[in-house]
Image: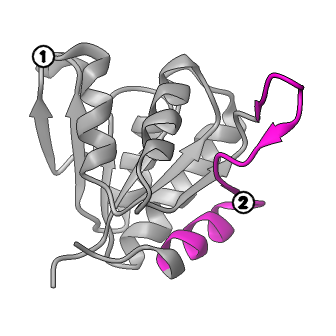
Amino acid sequence: MPPIQVAVCGPRDCPDTDTRNAREVGRLLAEAGVTVLCGGGTGVMAAVAEGASSAGGLVIGIRPDTDPAAICPGLSAVLYTNMGEARNTILIRSADAVIVVGGSWGTLSELALANHRDDVPIVSLGGWQILDAAGQPIESSAVATSPAHAVEYVLSHAASR
């Protein structure tokens, strides 16, 4: 059975809290034997790659471009899609679970794509709260209180393909 693949999504420009959380999420996922998928760039992507690779994990970056100079350290492999933000679909469709750390417009698109799937658990660690037209919260993901809680959630809810 192949390992569980978890996409970790988050902004390229993020506060230190998101960086620390993403690094710890990466480390914990790697220690659990999970394959980490990310966008392969800066910010949350670089932090999760650093955390996972420092723990000996497999990290695959799915890039929106074809520029080797734009990738972050810590990636085990890179998929250059040259698809811009359309690569978000590849990232989400390749995942058995999704962890969202922080929020940006690109991260919101990844969260929306993940919610379009019925078979993927989603957990957020900070970031977006989605409201309906009446201003009421829409449950778009489970909410984690820590990196350990986020990883525990996806490990208990994700099934390997």
Q: Is residue 105 visible?
A: yes
- According to the image, label 1 marks what residue? 82
Residue situated in front as seen by the camera: 78 or 90: 90
The amino acid pointed to by label 2 is Ala
Q: Is residue 72 left or right of residue 134?
A: left
Residue name at image x 24 percent, y 27 percent? 87
Residue situated in front as seen by the camera: 157 or 40: 157
**Image position, residue 8 (x, y; %):** 44, 48
Count of residue discs: 2
- Mark 2 lies on a secondary structure that is loop
Q: Is residue 131 magenta?
A: yes
Q: Earlier in the sequence, mark 2 or mark 1?
A: 1
Q: Is residue 40 visible?
A: no
* Residue 153 occupies quadrant: bottom right
Q: Is residue 122 above or below residue 114?
A: below
Residue name at image x 68 percent, y 49 percent? 125
Where the C terminus falls, by quadrant?
Answer: bottom left
Neighbor class of circle 1 (other Cα within 10 Å; few <14, some 14-19, many 20+) is some
Q: Is residue 70 magenta?
A: no
Q: Is residue 151 above or below residue 79?
A: below
Q: Are discs 2 and 1 less than 8 Å apart at CB?
A: no
Query: Going by the picture, which residue comes out furthest to the front?
Result: 134
Q: Is residue 142 left or right of residue 41?
A: right
- According to the image, label 2 marks what residue? 144
**Image position, residue 4 (x, y; %):** 30, 72
**Image position, residue 41 (x, y; %):** 34, 27
Q: Is residue 140 above or below residue 10?
A: below
- Mark 1 lies on a secondary structure that is loop
Magenta region: which residues?
A: 130-155
